[in-house]
Image (cartoon, grey):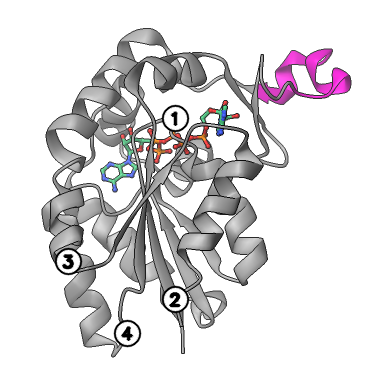
Amino acid sequence: MSTIVVLVGPPGSGKGTQAKVLCERFGMAHLSTGDMLRAAKKAGTLEPEFLAIMDSGGLLPDAAVIGLIDRRSREADCSPGFLLDGFPRTVPQAEALGTMLDSRGLKLDAVVQLDVKRELLEERLIHRRTDKRSGQIYHLLYNPPPPELLQAPDSLEHRKDDQPDAVKTRLDAYDSMTAALLPYYEERGLLRRIDGVGKPEEVTGRVVASLDTVK
Ligand code: AP5
């Protein structure tokens, strides 16, 4: 039986950081719509209008990301289960996910919300750097990249949507579109609210404890 978990939280709440650890620990595939879109951008296959939306911090049309998840979640590595990071982000995406899982005889086990206040999020995003080769996420102050990466700045990515204007747009999009998922999943008894403040390993411990009752 597959374990299927959604990780939801505002930009910078630590979804990517936690997803990597949780997927290793529970043997789930990591399905991040943001990573998939950035990979398409790098490969030059992302439609120019989608590229502009992403860079400015807006949300892509629901149909585009639903199609991505539908295809990716059918791949072999998803059979033991998968963790959705950054999807769904709107109620129509959540409804589409429900329909998709139903049609395959699957069910969502849990929705984990990482709760972090807005003031902390801006600070986390502006100082984020990502190792271009491994995808490892760093923070210039709290979890700095190793000296060899700092001495070769081209090896570190500073995301275009981590510039202050795009960060504000992304946080506003979360408040106006994505926060509606919390009551949606709470009504269905799936929501687990986790304090996302503290050392990353402390947050992992809280998430793992909240998933204890899954399966
Ligand atoms: P996406 O890549 O999903 O971005 P996001 O949701 O904005 O989330 P982030 O990746 O910015 O943050 P995160 O929560 O993963 O935090 P992280 O672990 O990196 O999406 C990008 C764009 O793609 C969207 O804006 C949209 O355009 C498009 N898109 C994607 N999905 C879509 C969808 N479903 N529908 C429509 N459009 C979609 O951590 C952030 C920083 O904090 C790092 O520096 C990290 O080191 C640090 N940090 C992490 N944990 C801690 C901690 N506990 N304490 C201190 N620092 C910490």
Nearest the eye: 34 or 102: 102
Residue at the (72%, 42%) spot, across then down: 134
Q: CA distance from mark 4 to mark 2?
A: 14 Å
Q: Which residue is mark 3?
A: 96
Q: Position of residue 147 (x, y in %)?
A: 87, 18
User: Which residue type carries mark 4?
Assistant: Leu
Q: Is residue 2 left or right of residue 111?
A: right
Mark 3–mark 1 CB contact (< 8 Å): no
- The residue under label 3 is which amino acid type? Ala
Please name the amino acid that badge 2 sits on. Val
**Residue designated by label 1:** 12
The answer for how far apart the CA atoms under marks 4 and 3 are is: 13 Å
Q: Earlier in the sequence, mark 2 or mark 3?
A: 3
Q: Which residues are magenta?
A: 145-156
Give the SS element for disc 1: loop
Question: Is 142 drawn above or below residue 86 in the view shown?
Answer: above
